Image (cartoon, grey):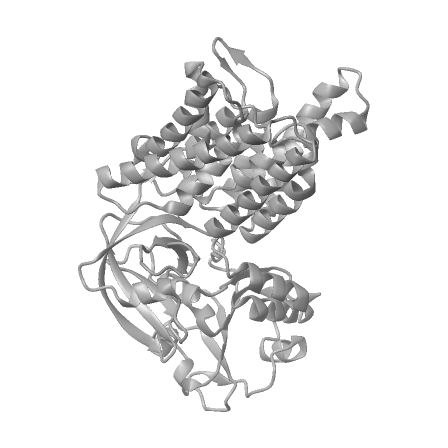
Amino acid sequence: MIAAKSRVDTWLGRFTMYRLILWVLGVLAAYSMVLNILGWLTFGLPEMLVHLVLCLGATYASGRLLALLFGVKQHTESSLITGLLLYFLFWPAFGAMDMAGVALACVLASVSKYALAFRGRHIFNPAAAGAFITGLTGLNIATWWAATPAMLWLLVPGVVIVLYRTRKMLMGTVFLVAATSIITVELLSRDMTLGQALWQALAQRPLLFFVGFMLSEPLTLPPRRWQQLALAAVVGVVFAVPYNFGFIANSPELALLLGNLIAFFLGQRGGVHLTFKGSRPLTPASTEFRFEPQRPVRFEPGQFMELNLPHSGSDGKGRRRVFSITSPPGAAEVTFGVGTAEPLSAAKKALLALRPGDSVSATAVGGDFVLPHDAGKPVLLIAAGIGITPFLSQLAADDAARDTVVVYLAKGRDELACVEQLEASGAKVVARLADGSTPPEYMVDAGTSRIDAARLKELVPDIGDREVFVSGSPASVDSLRAAARGAGARRVHVDSFAGY
């Protein structure tokens, strides 16, 4: 079971979140064409083809023009994803007003990334903003036709894949429970059976499409998991409760926009602009990159930052990459530890090609891999290779003399990063070096044996009293989490690096 999960995580980790959503939406668009040919959808195939070309073409062209006007590089994947979302929101038709409304929604979606933004960060989901404003003009109204029973055969697995890859399964569940409960109660009051009410809520209303591809957008979510869960519940209620205030009535796009606004005030308000200052090797296979932020960055030790790394010769994974922050909050510079062993991806080549003074933007800051706020709570930090990076920020910032044990797995002594920083932290460090080399004197030598439940219990006898954090590759994380559970750990937090 663990091996199968590791293989799935490793395979999905090869896709950035944006590339994965683009592929899933593309497959769903092709599937909708097949359904139409089979007669399971009522649109004409020419209308669907023209509608798809219009959505993709209008969002791409307007996005490219705006990028030129603002002197930035267009994020092509983002434009194509927005176009595909609008393809599923608006009814395919040849009417002049209908097509004008769709084109307007596409342009407004692109414009919203710049006009409805604060310090370089867009506030609202572009597709929802474009659809909502277009609806106010009366040219066209979003029907969310993706909520069609025939679409469920691929829509459901597509949504599950996206939520699993983005680790938003619980958030999606909270939204679905909140919205479905309200809608079901309303339908039951209309003398429907429970089965009929649930079927209509999940198969004929856009809850699944909404949660899988709209609500889960990372740029418009708050940074912490508990905030995301609370937001999902609020949006679920607003989505499902019927209301009408003059010309404003409840709609999925309005529910999402209200959620986006709440999220904006909970997270890093405004984009993050970084100036590259330099780099240094952490180990033969990893490098630390230093940046000076234009303004202070709000984050907690252990969180990540998503960098936008424009580069030519893309390896098919897009321009955005997530990296753990290794510097403590409040430091003059923001640093990242990155594995830089060969073969190098296009994104890592772009990082290594940076010269002092070059600018890089960050599109998101967040994550829940943070230590307990109670400084009296003892912790165990288990790092496999490059998984040490989030712990570096935590150890540098945790000056409350917390009882901390670090178990560090590496190939050899030369693969141990920041040994001076680890020693200065005061934490007890246990090193397991695969090649049998000797760790620094202050570290406990765990030998070369595999770290399983019995060995971990031997190394950390009080593991049951500690909150455990595990970081590394997906396969290492799954194995070490199982070992920690088997050794008696009650709470285990994980952070896996798929590698780019």
Pick the quarter of the image with the C terminus: bottom left
Q: Residue at x 52, y 68 (%)?
A: 473
Q: Residue at x 60, y 50 (%)?
A: 161
Pick the quarter of the image with the N terminus: bottom right
Q: Position of residue 325 (x, y in %)?
A: 37, 60
- Farthest residue toward the top? 246
Does residue 171 lie above or below 104 as drawn?
Answer: below
Nearest the camera: 15 or 490? 15
Does residue 74 lie above or below 377 as drawn?
Answer: above
Q: Residue at x 61, y 30 (%)?
A: 206
Q: Is residue 143 visible?
A: yes
- Farthest residue toward the left? 357
Q: Position of residue 8 (x, y in %)?
A: 62, 61
Q: Residue at x 63, y 80 (%)?
A: 455
Residue 63: quarter of image:
top left
Residue 236: quarter of image:
top right
Q: Position of residue 81 (x, y in %)?
A: 46, 41
Q: Is residue 221 visible?
A: no
Q: Position of residue 163 (x, y in %)?
A: 58, 47
